Amino acid sequence: MSIGNAPDGNSPEDNRPSLPEDDRPSIGRALREARIDSGLTVEEVSNSTRVRIPLVHAIEEDDFSRCGGDVYARGHVRTLARAVGLDPAALVEQYDAEHGGRPTPTPAAPLFEAERIRPERRRPNWTAAMVAAIVAVVGFVGFTLLGRDDSGSKHVAEGPAPSRSVSPPAKPVQPEPSPPVASESAIAAVPQDKVTVKLTAIDDKSWISAKARDGKLLFDGLLLKGDSKTFQDDERLDLILGNAGAIELYVNGKKVEDEFARGQVERLSYTKGDPQVG
C-alpha cells in the first residue's frame, strides 16, 4: 500500500464532497452585492442600463414576476450583470437552471406588431421639379424672343420673301435624378459626433426594429440573409433583434462580440461612446 492512498487505490481527495450549487448566492443577491462593491446606486445602474428602478429593486430581491416572461428576465439579468461587472453567461445559466431550463424562442414577428406604425409618406422631390420649371421658363422666353425678331424684320425690295427655315426650339432636357446614396454601405469612417449602428443578417433572416432617440421609427421589418442596414442618430439608437443569433452587429465602427443565441430576442440601446461594456 502506497503512502497517502486509500486501500482501494483512490486518493483521499477524491472522496471529499463537492460544494453543492445551493451554496452559491442567489441571482438577485449576487447582483446587489456586485453593485455595492462597485460603488453604484440603483439609480446609476438604471440610467446606464435603461432598466426601470422598480424592476432593478425587484430583480435584486429575486422577484422576476415583473419582467414579463423568461425571455425578458434573462435579458435583464444579462444587462444588469454587465453593468456591475459580473459574468452574464454564468448568471443566465443559473437562471435557466432555477426556472425550468432555457425558454423556447418566441416568434419574432408578433413581438413587433404593437410597435409598428404607418410608414411615412414619401416627400416630393422639389429639387427636380424646380429644375424642370426653370428649364421650361428659359425655353419659353427664348422661343418668344425668336418670334419677335422674325415679325419685326423688314424687306428692302418687293417680292417674295426668301424662305427661312426655322428649326423648332429644342425640347427642355429633364435632368436625370442622381441615384440615392446607399445607407447599407460598409462603414469606412464613422462620424464621432453621432451614434452609428450597422446590422447584417449573416446566416439567417431576422426581424429587427430601430428607433432614434426621439422615438422616431427608422426601420421595422425583416432583414433577409445577407442583407445589411445602417442607422445613425445624434445621441441614441434603440434596437430590438428578433433573431439575435443571426445578426452581426457593428456599433460606431466596432464589432460587438456578444454571443447572442439563435431565436433569442434582444433589446439594445447604444450612444455615441459605445461600445464601452461588453
Image (cartoon, rainbow, N blue to C red):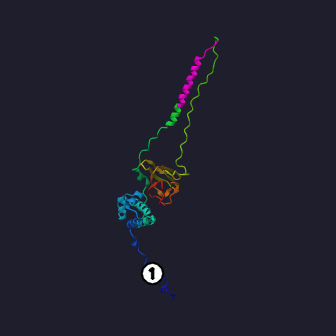
Image coordinates for residue 219, horizontal then vertical, percent: 46, 48
Q: Is residue 42 above or below residue 223?
A: below
Image coordinates for residue 116, horizontal then vertical, percent: 41, 48
What segment carries the magenta color? 134-156
Considering depth in this image, is 231 or 171 the residue closer to the camera?
231
**Which secondary structure lies at badge 1?**
helix
In the picture, residue 105 is in which quadrant? bottom left
Residue placed furthest toward the front: 39
Residue under the point 53% across and 34% down:
131
Looking at numbered disc 1 in the image, what kind of residue is underneath it?
Asn
Residue 261 appears in view: no
Q: Which residue is mark 1?
A: 15
Count of labels shown? 1
In the picture, residue 102 is in which quadrant? bottom left
Magenta includes 278? no
In the picture, residue 23 is in which quadrant? bottom left
Q: Is residue 123 above or below residue 199?
A: above
Residue placed furthest toward the bottom: 1
Considering depth in this image, is 267 or 42 the residue closer to the camera?
42
Image coordinates for residue 265, horizontal then vertical, percent: 44, 57
Residue under the point 59% across and 20% down:
149
